[in-house]
Image (cartoon, helix red, strand yellow):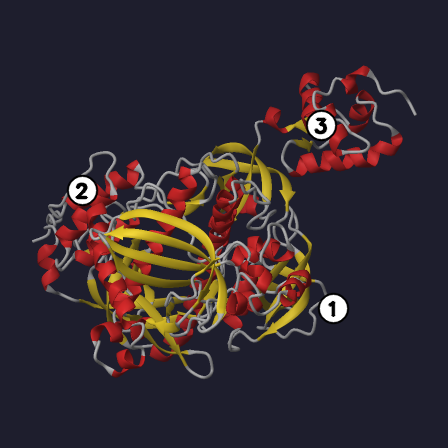
Amino acid sequence: MKKKNNLRLQDPFLEREREQYEHPLPSREFILQILTEQGAPLSEDELLDMLNIEREEEDLFSRRLRAMERDGQIMRNRKRAICVMDKLDLIKGKVQGHPDGFGFLVPEDGSPDMFLSEKEMHQVLHGDVVMVRQSGVDRRGRPEAKIVEVLERANNKVVGRLYEEHGIQFVVAENRRITQDILVTPGESGGAKTGQVVILEILKHPDKHAQPIGRIVQVLGNYADPGMEIEIALRKHDLPYEFPRDAERQAKAIPPVVSEQDWAGREDIRHLPLVTIDGETARDFDDAVYCEPVKGGYRLVVAIADVSHYVQTNDALDREAISRGNSVYFPRRVIPMLPEELSNGLCSLNPKVDRLCMVCDMQISSKGDIGKYRFYPSVMYSHARLTYNQVAEILGEPDGKLAESNSPIVPHLQHLHELYQKLLKAREKRGAIDFETVETQMIFTDQGKISRIVPVVRNDAHKLIEECMLAANVCAAGYLQEHHHPVLYRIHQGPTPEKLEALREFMKEFGLGLTGDDEPQAADYSKLLKRIKGRPDAGLLQTVMLRSLRQAKYEPENIGHFGLGYDAYTHFTSPIRRYPDLLVHRAIKAVLQGKQYKPAQKWAELGIHCSMTERRADDATRDVEAWLKCFYMRDHLGSVFTGSVSSVTSFGMFVSLDDLYVEGLVHISELGKDYFHFDAAKHHLLGERTGQSYRLGDRVQVRVVKVDMESTKIDFVLHSVVEESEAEAKPKKKSAKGRK
C-alpha cells in the first residue's frame, strides 16, 4: 500500500472522519476545496490520483462522490468530468408540475420559482429533484429554467387508470401534475382491463426523446368501486397506510392494561370525576377534563393520554409515527398515526378503566386569566364518555332525563360551562380572531356513497372543549419557553405586506378600514369582524379577510400565533393523532426530570416534515371529498340551484351551492357575450362592454351541466343573478363607456 501523500493529510476534517470510519476517506468539504482550488473540472482518475486513493478504497470513494452528486454539491459534465456545482451557477430544486403540461422549479434556497416549459417537463415528472440553469425570462417576466441534470427521481410507482389506443397500453396518472402518459411494456399489464385503476412501477424514466415506461404491479379495481377514492388518494399522496411488521409486533407486545410498574413517579387522580367529550363517531379519546370552583376562580384539569410512555424515541412505533406525522380522517375511514392497540386501546382514555396521562393542572381567575399551573404524569379514570350533543342537552336541560342519569357529573359540567364563559371573555379581550365558518358532514348510503351533505352545528360543548384545549396548549408553550427547552411551536404569521395592502384597498370600497398600520394584530381583525357582523355582505368581507392570512405551521422558532392572539402556542392535547404533540410531551417530561430531550431528527427538520404531513393529509381528504361530491352530483345533472360565488379566477368563478354544500365552476365563456377581465385585488370579473361584474360573495342561480369523475370537476352554467338586498351594500360601479 502506497504511503498517503501530504495533500490528503491536510484535510481539516480528517479527525472527524477517523472517528466515524475505520478507513477514513477525504471529507466532502476537502473534496470540494480541492476541486475549487483547481479552477477547472477534474476527471475521476485525476481526482483519485491527486488524493492518492488506494485501489481498495476506490469503490467507497466513488460512493461518496455519488452521494455528493445526489446532494447537489458536484455534478459531471458531458465529458464525465467532476464540477463544483457552485461554480456552474446552477440552481437545485424540486419540479412542480402543472396539469396543463408546463411546470416550475421550486428552488431549495427559497429563491423565486422558475418556469419550466412543456419541452423541459418532457424529461421529468412532478416531484423530481433537478439542477437547472436560468435560460431567460418568459413573457410574464418570470425567470425561465433549463434542466441540466436530474438528481433524484421522485416517482417509482404511480397510481392511475389503464387505457389502450391502437393496441398500445398506457397509464394516465391520478396525480394531474404528472401529465405524461406512461407506456406499459407489452405483456406487463398484470391482467388489468382498460379503465381499471392500477399501480404501475416505472421501469424507465422519461428523457428528452422518450416517454416513461413501466409495468403494472397491482390492479386496485374499477373506478366506481366503493372505497376506491380512498385507495387512490392513499397512493397518489404517498400516505403510509400499512404498519411495518416491527411496529405491529411492538404494539401487540404492549400489555393491554396499565401495569403496576407503570405507576412509578405518577400522581393518582382517579378520584377526580374526569370525563371525555367528543363527537358521536370518535374512537380515539386524547383528552379528559374536570373543573371545580376555587377561591378567586376555577381549577381546570386537562388530562391527556400519555403516548410518550409507550412510544419511545426512534423505536419502531416512533419511526412510523414520524413518517405518518398525523392521523388522516377520511369520510368513513381513518388512517391512524398509531396502531389500533394504542390509538383505540391503551392510549385512548376510554371510560371506566385506568389510563396513564400527562396532566396540565391550571388555576384560572374569575376573569378567565390563567394563573399558576403545573404539569405532572398521572393515572386517571374516565368517569364517562360523553358526546358534544349530550353535554349540550345536559347544560340546556339540567332537570331532564339525560341530566338525571348523569347526576354525579352534572355539577362539574356546569362548572366547566361557567369557566368557558370566562375564557370566552378573555378571548375577546385578547382579540383572537373568530371567523364564522360552516363545517359539513357527509351522510352515506350502505353502498358508501353520499346520500346528503348536512351542516354541523357547533354548540357550547364544542366551544367549551376547544377553550380548555387552548388553555392547556398555551401552558405547554409557556412552560417550555420558561425552561428554555426547544420544541415545535405552532406558529401563525399575520398578512404579508402585499396581502395587507390588497385587503385594505378592497375594504376601502366598502367604506371600511383595518386598524393597526403596517403591523395589524389579531385584535384589529376582530374589531373589523365585529363591524361587519350582521351586514348582508359579511360573508364576502370575512372571506377576503381570511384569505389575507398565512397558513399555520410548525417551527422551533417561536414567533407567536397571530390568529389566536398568543405570544407562544404549541400543540399538547392530541398525541394519539399528531406527532408534534408527542414531541411536546417528551420535552415536558424531560424538563420535569431536569434533562433536555433530543429527538431523532433536528427540530427544524421535524417542523418542516410535520407541516408537510399536515398539508398532505388535507390534500388527500380534499381529493376524496371532491370525488364523492362528483359521484353525488351525477344524480343532479340539469338541476338548478342557488348559491354564492366562493372564488373568482381568470378563467371563471366557482359557486358554492346553498343546500348541497358542493362547489362547481362557471367558466368565463358562460358569463355572456363580452370580454371579462379578472381583477385579483377586487375579487371580481368585469365585462368590458357591458360593465357586468361578478364578485366574490354574489348570489347566483346555476344549472348543473357536467360532472367529470376523472378530473373531479363539476361545471355549472349561469341561470340567473339573484338580486337581493345585499346589492345595496356593494360599492357603486362606474358606468362603462357608452353604456346608458
Query: Residue 157, image x and y in percent?
Result: 63, 59
At label 3, which amino acid type do we have? Arg
Identify residue type, mark 1: Gly
Measure how far apart labels 3 and 2 are at the Cα level: 56 Å
Outermost top residue: 6
Q: CA distance from mark 1 to mark 3?
A: 52 Å
Check contact, mark 1 vs mark 2: CB within 8 A: no
> What residue is disc 3 on?
16
N-terminal-most mark, 1 or 2: 1
Note whether 346 is above or below 695 in the view shown: below
Residue placed at 16% from the left, 57% from the top? 537
Q: Is residue 244 above or below residue 61?
A: below
Residue 250: x %, y % from top left: 65, 62
Look at the image and tell me whether residue 413 can be seen.
Answer: yes
Closer to the N terminus: mark 3 or mark 2? 3
Residue 85, above or below 588: above
Q: Secondary structure at mark 1?
A: loop
Instruction: Say left or right for 164 vs 362.
Output: right
SS at mark 3 in the image: helix
> Where is mark 1, residue-wise?
187
Binning the other alpha carbons within 10 Å of mark 3 as few (below 14), some (14 to 19) or many (20 upward) gives: few
Q: Judge the density around disc 2: few (<14), some (14-19), many (≥20) Cα neighbours within 10 Å.
A: many
Residue under numbered circle 2? 514
